[in-house]
Image (spheres, rainbow, N blue to C red):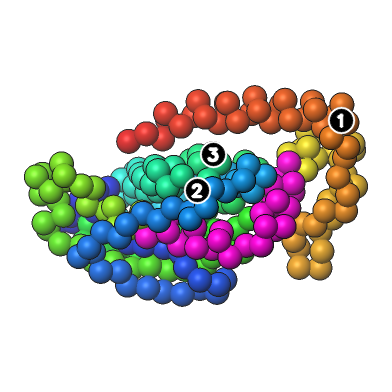
Amino acid sequence: MMKPGFWGTLLIVLWGLPGCVTETVKSTSVPALKSPILTIPEAELLDLGIVVFDPGIKNTEEDPFTYPELRKAEATFIATKLAEVLTEQGAWGAVRVVPDDGQFSDLSVNGTILKSDGESLSLKVQVTDSRGRLLLDKKYSDTTSKYAYQQNTREKMDPFLTVYRTIANEILASFSRLPVLDRRTIRQVTEMRFAQDFAEEAFREYLHKDEKGQLRIRRLPAENDPMLTRVRELRQRHAIFIDTLQGHYTV
C-alpha cells in the first residue's frame, strides 16, 4: 500500500553553477535559514515567481501507485511551502506562487517531481532570471522515516522544513554571486518584458535577444515617459491581482 504522497515530500534543491547535479539530503537536522548580511537596496531586490511544480505524471502507467490528483495537489503544496520560507528569509521583493513562468518575475523557480511515494522523493529544480539566464539546475533526492509523520512531531515543526530552508539558502547563495549591475539589469528587463506585452510597438526596440537566446537591454525609456508611467501603473494592478490568487494556493 502506498504511503501518503501529499505529505510525504522531503528533499532539497538548487545549488552551485548551472549544470544538472544530483544531491541526496540527510534530514537529521534542520539548517538555519540564512538572511542577507547587509540590507539589499530597493533597486536590487528581486521578485520571485515560484511556478506550481510539474507533477511529473506523464508516465503514470508505469507506476500504478501514482495518483494524478494527489500528485497535482502535492505539486502545489511544494511550491507554496517554498514560497513561505523564501518570504520568511527577508531577502526578496515579492515572493509569489504563480501558475506558469510567463508572469514576468525577476527570478522564476521551476520544479518537477521525479519520484514521490511518501518515503522517497526526487525533484528537479531550475532557477532562471528574466533575461533567460539559467542560474541553478539541480536534482535532489531524499528518504524520510515514519517518525516524520507522527502528529506530535508535525505540531512542533514541519517535517520537510529542512527541504525548504535548504532550497531558500541555495537560491540566496546564487543571488549573492550576482554582480550589482546584473541584479539591476534583471529588474529592468522584467519591466521591459511587461511593457512589451502591454504595448509591443512602443517598447519593441528596448530589448533584443542575443545568439544564446538571452534578452539584453538596448536602451531604456526616460523616467518621465508617459507610456512607462502607464505601464508601471498597470503592472502594479497586475501584481495586486496575482496577490489575490495566493489564497488559492494556500494549503
User: Magenta stretch: residue 81 in it?
Assistant: no
Residue 207 seen anywhere in this rendered image of the structure: yes
| Residue position for label 1 | 224
Q: What is the magenta range?
A: 166-191
Separation (CA) of disc 3 from disc 2: 10 Å
Above or below for 222 versus 113? above
Q: Residues within 10 Å of mark 2 (few under 14, many from 20)?
A: many
Residue 167 - label:
none
Relative vertical location of residue 221 with respect to residue 3 in this rendering, above or below: above
Q: Marks 1 and 2, how far apart in space?
A: 29 Å
Q: Residue at x 78, y 37 (%)?
A: 195
Q: Nearer the viewer, residue 214 or 54?
A: 214
Please rate how many residues cluster around mark 1, counting C-alpha atoms within 10 Å: few if below 14, some from 14 to 19, many from 20: few
- Splitting the image into 4 quarters, where does residue 2 fall? bottom left
Element marked by disc 3: loop
Give percent across and percent down for residue 13: 41, 63
Figure quadrant of the N terminus: bottom left
Q: Nearer the viewer, residue 247 or 33?
A: 33
Which residue is denoted by mark 3 in the rendering? 94
Counting residues from the N terminus, which is met first, the one under dot 1 or under dot 3? 3
The answer to whether one can see residue 63 in this image is no
Q: Amino acid at mark 3?
A: Ala
Residue at point 77% right, 30% down? Answer: 231
Locate residue 203, reporting x and y percent. Answer: 86, 40
For mark 2, what is the residue?
91
- Which residue appears at 50% of the width and 25% of the height? 244
